[in-house]
Amino acid sequence: MQGRTLWELKVFCAVVEKHSFVTAARVMGISPSSATRTVQALETQLGVQLLQRSHKLLSLSAAGELYYESAKKMLEMQAEAENEIASLQSGATGSIRFSAPEIFSRFFLPQQIGLLTQDFPDVRIDVLYTDIMVDPIQENLDFSIRGAYPLSSELIGYPLWDYDRILCASPAYIEKHGAPDKPEDLSSHAIVLHTAPRILKDWYFKSDARTLRMHMPATHRVSSGTGLYELIRAGMGIGRLAAWVAKPAIESGELVHLCPAYRMVSSSGKNPQMHAVYGAKGLPRRAKMLLEVLRTKGLEQGFEATKR
């Protein structure tokens, strides 16, 4: 790598990963012509062609494939060294860019962000609230917080807490339609379904005695976690909520926990999990600090699943 700058390596890797000089230039904040000249200069220094170009296709040459792997490792080592240096500092600085489920905008996360930024005033927060499954690498995020059941992925997972998912309805709904005692009774009730990030029409109920699978056609559908919560509170039907979201409303009498002998699980019988995912380059120290705070505070507040 002697004679090559980290900037040239970053531009080259960005072009390879985005399959486009134009897109890579946009990500790097430079012009497409500058990105092209940087890669051409790199090829001239090395004396080999790294990229094969055609009108609509951009691919690595054999030499480019070898060089790309080495360049990636060099950039990862540099990032790791910067993180190690940052860990020697007494406080965290810089921005933390991440996504989180929309329900987090109402529950739990704002308070924890406030506490973190009080302790570390030089930290800046940039949050994308969405129930859509976000790829942190494509969106240039430090990490992405997800709920429900972890998917197999090349992304690295950071578990926060397992949690129970329970059935709830408002007192007004129950007064008008009655309360189901067991999952089989749900067929005569209005069901409110959360459709993001994907529609799961089959629900799995687990008690100490049995596990039951039921197909649940929706009476009402909503793509937002907060929207689901509010529809249930408004008496529109029965829906499933994370226990850590529903618990305060149950304690205040705004919601009622239905079929309490059952909890909602995956098809393999596992509890849902709140977790974060990030790319192979790792987490900056400040981002890891925030995730550690969220995990610790969540467990302190009893968000974890019931031990059964």
Image (cartoon, rainbow, N blue to C red):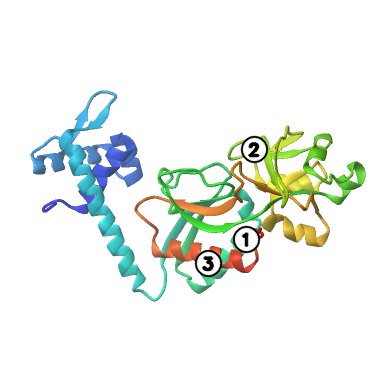
Q: Amino acid at mark 2?
A: Thr
**Residue 37 in view (yes/no):** no
Marks 2 and 3, how far apart in space? 29 Å
Residue drawn at (65%, 43%) of the image: 224
Question: Going 83% across and 49% down the picture, which residue do you hit?
Answer: 170
Query: Residue 123: x and y, percent?
Result: 46, 65
| Tag 3 secondary structure | helix
Are circles 2 and 3 on residues that touch, CB within 8 Å?
A: no
Residue 240, compared with residue 191, is above or below; it is: below
Query: How many badges with numbers are in the image?
Result: 3
Q: Position of residue 172 (x, y in %)?
A: 88, 48
Residue pictured at 67% horizontal, 59% vertical? 306
Q: Gap in Å between the C-alphas at discs 3 and 1? A: 15 Å
What label does residue 293 carry, if any?
3
Name of the residue lying farthest toward the right: 176
**Which dot, 3 or 1, sits closer to the camera?**
1
Q: Nearer the viewer, residue 1 or 121?
A: 1
